Image: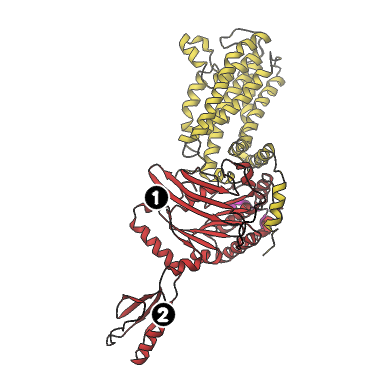
């Protein structure tokens, strides 16, 4: 039997030592999760392929080359589509799979806090989302379909806030998702309703007023609005704005996004379970 | 709550001389209307092993989950090193090692990567090589967790539980599913931790394990502690047994001091709290009459008997099917 350091010497060391910071702990887990992702070749190829196909569609389908550059609009679409169809569904499936495999409960027995476990587990998905959006931006720029954004802060807030919101909503959705396979189905309502009415596929201003107003309060809409204001300088109703106008128009979507983060946080806190139901 | 008391004052002189490392007072847990744990209390001191025994559904895991900081108690209090395992996360967790009854690890990381990752989240981790050597897995660092055998996986679990040099170790069925050799490895690791002053709380189905490791044992039934004491004290609550066969022509048994006849002739079973005089009287009687007591057995009271006696009681109460390991 190999020898172990006695716990008495260990305890004096432990009581004087300060542990790794929250960030370092989360990064340790994020690193392991990223390594796991990179070992899954299908997932890696898929996540590279999707944005490249999106960019390739521009010349193939004959978009672009017109007076208005399509790059910014395409990046707005990428942010909306990636957040919902990749970030949210992926995180939901991952959280449920880790819960059912009893990994989450195990992670919680150490010094990591619950929030650190969730963030560390979500890290690769969030990184891929940001990477894919950047890839779409870079791709369209390479095609010469890029214009300087009206504001860079708003789209960054949209992307990061959107990522956080998807994490919280995915955590909340685990409450009614038993297996990672069923994640595709349980996620469907949020996917369909919020993407359809987010202003991604048609401007919300074509809807009757009350419906358009209601749609602006759905979770994905402020993310699309903020990205569009910053990248394309267009409001939700399609009016062109400058930098000051963009920020004025951004107040409502910023507030809606903040409110959703609050709602998502409390739903996640209430609905999330660390262990499978027996 | 002030959190962990790093230098407990010595108030006792027994072998477990420090302030209790674990204090459980009137702990209760409910799932809906079902009461899984109905007010249990115990203390575990540094350098002491406390074993919770009980059939499935007795409430062992439900009780441990509160110690582990994974669940909130519905009543009562739990203190680990003076702190609340949930609220005082930052002060308690660095000193708490937990082995869950069943838990998962990502299958596509190697053993080495798994331990390294876990170590990076801890305040005062052992070196990875030492952790692997502890559980005899030195040569397995490059193997994916997916490819490990059940026993190896359990030993890896244990290595992670010990990785932070815990002062309090909670082990939920540490050796279930292990081969005898691995089980011995686990036992000697636990003993080593205890020698270093770690307080250990464990649950087990193996009475041999409780006898081997535990300083004190509590037998749990339907969420209550039915019996508590040292293994010897607990065994002593049960009578010793004498068994033998008598031929059909044998005379009736004489009255024997302090003996209860459980089964009469021809397959006799006697219970007594005082084995030696009872046996002496019996053998003298048999010698007098030149009788052969075929298949004579005399067994001292055992922990197993005590456990079965309490567990038998459990079969008559209703809640056998309830989920002890609701969240494993």
Q: Is residue B46 above or below residue B292?
A: above
| Residues in magenta, as a range | B139-147
Separation of disc 1 and disc 2 at Cα? Answer: 38 Å
Specify the chain shown as red: B
Q: Which residue is mark 1?
A: B322
**Residue B15: in sight, yes or no?**
yes
Chain for numbered disc 1: B
| Callout 2 secondary element | strand
Q: Which residue is mark 2?
A: B297
Q: Nearer the viewer, residue A42 or B171?
A: B171
Q: Earlier in the sequence, mark 1 or mark 2?
A: 2
Give the quadrant of the N terminus of chain A. bottom right
Chain for numbered disc 2: B
Q: Colour of chain A?
A: yellow
- Residue B88 in percent (x, y) is at 60, 42
In the rendered view, how is the structure colored?
Answer: by chain
């Amino acid at each position: 039997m190999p020898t172990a350091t006695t716990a008495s010497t260990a305890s004096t060391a432990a009581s004087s030592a300060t542990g790794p910071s929250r960030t370092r702990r989360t990064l340790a887990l994020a690193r392991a999760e990223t390594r796991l992702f990179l070992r899954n070749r299908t997932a890696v190829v898929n996540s590279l392929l999707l944005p490249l196909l999106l960019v390739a569609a521009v010349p193939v389908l004959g978009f672009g080359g017109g007076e208005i550059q399509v790059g910014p609009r395409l990046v707005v679409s990428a942010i909306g589509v990636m957040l919902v169809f990749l970030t949210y569904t992926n995180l939901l499936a991952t959280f449920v799979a880790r819960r059912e495999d009893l990994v989450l409960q195990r992670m919680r027995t150490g010094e990591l806090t619950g929030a650190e476990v969730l963030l560390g587990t979500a890290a690769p998905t969030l990184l891929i989302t940001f990477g894919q959006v950047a890839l779409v931006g870079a791709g369209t720029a390479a095609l010469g379909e890029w214009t300087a954004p009206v504001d860079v802060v708003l789209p960054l807030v949209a992307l990061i806030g959107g990522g956080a919101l998807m994490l919280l909503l995915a955590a909340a959705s685990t409450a009614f998702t038993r297996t990672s396979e069923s994640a595709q189905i349980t996620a469907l309502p949020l996917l369909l309703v919020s993407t359809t009415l987010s202003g991604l596929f048609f401007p919300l201003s074509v809807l009757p007023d009350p419906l358009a107003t209601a749609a602006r309060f759905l979770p994905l809409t402020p993310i699309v609005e903020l990205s569009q204001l910053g990248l394309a300088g267009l409001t939700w109703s399609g009016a062109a704005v400058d930098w000051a106008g963009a920020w004025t128009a951004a107040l409502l979507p910023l507030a809606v996004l903040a409110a959703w983060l609050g709602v998502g946080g409390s739903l996640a806190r209430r609905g999330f379970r660390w262990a499978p139901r027996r | 709550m002030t959190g962990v008391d790093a230098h407990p004052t010595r108030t006792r002189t027994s072998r477990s001389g420090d302030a209790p490392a674990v204090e459980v007072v009137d702990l209760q847990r409910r799932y809906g209307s079902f009461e899984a744990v109905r007010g249990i209390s115990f203390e575990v001191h540094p350098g002491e092993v406390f074993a919770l025994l009980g059939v499935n559904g007795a409430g062992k895991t439900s009780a441990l989950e509160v110690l582990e900081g994974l669940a909130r108690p519905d009543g009562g209090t739990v203190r680990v090193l003076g702190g609340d395992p949930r609220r005082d996360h930052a002060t308690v967790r660095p000193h708490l090692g937990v082995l869950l009854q069943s838990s998962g690890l990502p299958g596509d990381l190697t053993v080495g990567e798994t331990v390294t990752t876990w170590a990076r989240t801890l305040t005062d981790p052992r070196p990875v090589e030492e952790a692997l050597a502890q559980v005899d897995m030195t040569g397995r660092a490059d193997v994916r967790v997916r490819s490990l055998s059940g026993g190896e996986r359990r030993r890896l679990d244990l290595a992670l539980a010990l990785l932070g040099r815990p002062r309090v170790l909670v082990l939920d069925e540490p050796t279930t599913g292990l081969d005898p050799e691995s089980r011995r490895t686990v036992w000697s690791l636990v003993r080593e931790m205890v020698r270093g002053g770690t307080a250990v709380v464990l649950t087990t189905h193996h009475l041999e394990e409780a006898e081997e490791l535990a300083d004190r044992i509590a037998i749990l039934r339907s969420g209550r502690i039915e019996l508590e004491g040292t293994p010897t004290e607990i065994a002593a609550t049960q009578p010793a047994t004498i068994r033998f066969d008598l031929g059909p022509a044998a005379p009736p048994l004489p009255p024997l001091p302090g003996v209860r006849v459980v089964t009469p002739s021809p397959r006799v079973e006697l219970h007594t709290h005082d084995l030696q005089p009872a046996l002496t009287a019996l053998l003298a009687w048999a010698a007098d009459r030149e009788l052969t007591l075929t298949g004579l057995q005399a067994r001292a009271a055992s922990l197993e008997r005590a456990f079965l006696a309490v567990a038998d009681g459990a079969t008559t109460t209703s809640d056998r099917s309830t989920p002890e390991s609701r969240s494993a």
